[in-house]
Image: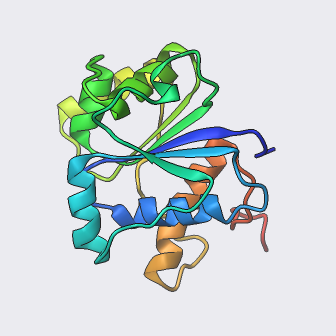
């Protein structure tokens, strides 16, 4: 199922770098790797990543980093064959720009392409609480076909560590993206 998949993982300047790190690690450890994993960091995301994780993330194949300031990436066009984009964590600023059609960088342009081509766009906001503008922007995106998956961990698998708690969100993102992974499922693992 994962073979020939081409996906984009965008990391924006919201707190929650641990979600993105675990997501990338899990994608790169799948039994059947996607053909391509494009990774885009916003400038703020790189700073927050270093602050929250204590270091820089080192990508390994098939992951490739793209410059957020350049539109010279295949997925900046609807003619590309990238099928899924995950923005994790998704800052409310990026969500607002996507919801209102402002494509000022590669992240927002790629998200716009996903929406216009009716491909899968998964947004993982980590903000809390939401104000009315946040909710209205997420409503617009939902109506346009995006999936909003708040970084709200679940507890029914009885996670014992922060990593296990984070993975409850990451596994949900992978499910929504259509990747096969072994995870706890309510009333199916007993």
In the displayed image of the protein, which residue is found farthest to the front?
72
Q: Position of residue 82 (x, y in %)?
A: 60, 30
The residue under the point 51% across, 24% down is: 114
The residue under the point 28% across, 78% down is: 54
In the displayed image of the protein, which residue is found farthest to the bottom?
160
Visible residue check, residue 128: no
Q: Classify residue 123 by image quadrant.
A: top left
Visible residue check, residue 69: yes
How many discs appear? Answer: 0
Relative to 165, 179 lies left or right: right
Closer to the camera in the image, 58 or 108: 58
The residue under the point 45% across, 65% down is: 21
Relative to 182, 48 lies left or right: left
Closer to the camera in the image, 138 or 87: 87
Q: Classify residue 10 by image quadrant.
A: top left
Closer to the camera in the image, 80 or 134: 80
The residue under the point 52% across, 85% down is: 160
Is residue 15 positioned above or below 109 on the image? below
Is residue 176 positioned above or below 160 on the image? above
Closer to the camera in the image, 158 or 104: 104
Q: Position of residue 157 (x, y in %)?
A: 61, 73
Q: Classify residue 112 by image quadrant.
A: top left
Q: Position of residue 16 (x, y in %)?
A: 33, 61
Is residue 100 positioned above or below 158 on the image? above
Q: Position of residue 88 (x, y in %)?
A: 41, 50
In the picture, which quadrant includes the C terminus?
A: bottom right
């Amino acid at each position: 199922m994962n073979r020939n998949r081409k996906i984009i993982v965008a990391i924006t300047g919201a707190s929650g770098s641990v979600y993105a790190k675990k997501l990338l690690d899990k994608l790169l450890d799948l039994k059947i790797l996607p053909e391509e994993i494009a990774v885009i960091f916003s400038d703020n995301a790189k700073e927050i990543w270093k602050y929250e994780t204590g270091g820089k993330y080192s990508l390994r194949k098939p992951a490739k980093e793209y410059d957020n300031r350049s539109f010279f990436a295949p997925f900046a066009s609807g003619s590309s064959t990238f099928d899924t984009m995950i923005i994790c964590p998704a800052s409310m600023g990026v969500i607002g720009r996507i919801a209102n059609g402002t494509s000022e960088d590669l992240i927002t342009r790629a998200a716009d392409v996903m929406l216009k081509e009716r491909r899968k766009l998964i947004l993982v906001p980590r903000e809390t609480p939401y104000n009315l503008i946040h909710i209205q922007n997420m409503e617009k995106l939902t109506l346009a076909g995006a999936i909003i998956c708040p970084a709200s961990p679940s507890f029914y698998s009885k996670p014992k560590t922060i990593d296990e708690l984070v993975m409850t969100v990451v596994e949900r993102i992978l499910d929504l993206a259509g990747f096969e992974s072994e995870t706890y499922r309510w009333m199916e693992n007993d």
